Amino acid sequence: RALERVFHEHGWHVALAGGVLLHGESAHDLDILVYPRSSATGVGTTKLRRALRDLGWTLRARAADLVEMWAERGSFDCKHVDIWATSDGKRVDVIVPTVTL
């Protein structure tokens, strides 16, 4: 709930994904999906990253760098995932769903 309050202030909603949602816990990381409250507001990843920094989180890997790394390994995966660390060092994968119509 605390995450949703911070994200909401910056124009985003947050949802759980991955191991924490599936098993109730994860020793590796926390996967969260974030999506704009409204597509009409022009919310971009700059505001999203500001919200995460407001939480005291540190960006460890940007989505573009991960996509490039995956391509070098032969993967065509191009989802938007930023890897962050919380103020106490826990890893959080922040996923921004993309849709191609």
Image (spheres, rainbow, N blue to C red):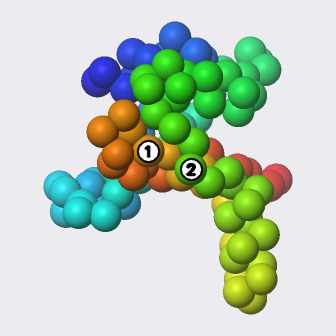
Outermost residue, top side: 9
- Secondary structure under badge 1? strand
Q: Identify the amino acid type marked 1.
A: Ala
Horizontal side, residue 46 vs residue 88: left or right: right
Can you identify the residue that label 2 sits on? 60
Can you identify the residue that label 1 sits on? 85
Horizontal side, residue 78 vs residue 21: left or right: right
Q: Quadrant of residue 6?
A: top left
What residue sits 56% from the left and 50% below the top?
A: 60
63 vs 76, nearest the viewer: 63
What residue sits 73% from the left and 66% below the top?
A: 67
Instruction: Return the x and y of residue 44 as percentages of the image width and height.
Output: 74, 28
What residue sits 39% from the left and 52% below the top?
A: 91
Inspect this view and state whether residue 6 appears: yes
Q: Quadrant of residue 2?
A: top left
| Label 1 crowd bin: few (<14), some (14–19), many (20+), radius 10 Å | some
Outermost residue, right side: 101
Horizontal side, residue 52 vs residue 55: left or right: right
| Label 2 crowd bin: few (<14), some (14–19), many (20+), radius 10 Å | few
Q: Is residue 27 above or below residue 45?
A: below
26 vs 55, nearest the viewer: 55
Instruction: Return the x and y of residue 40 as percentages of the image width and height.
Output: 76, 18
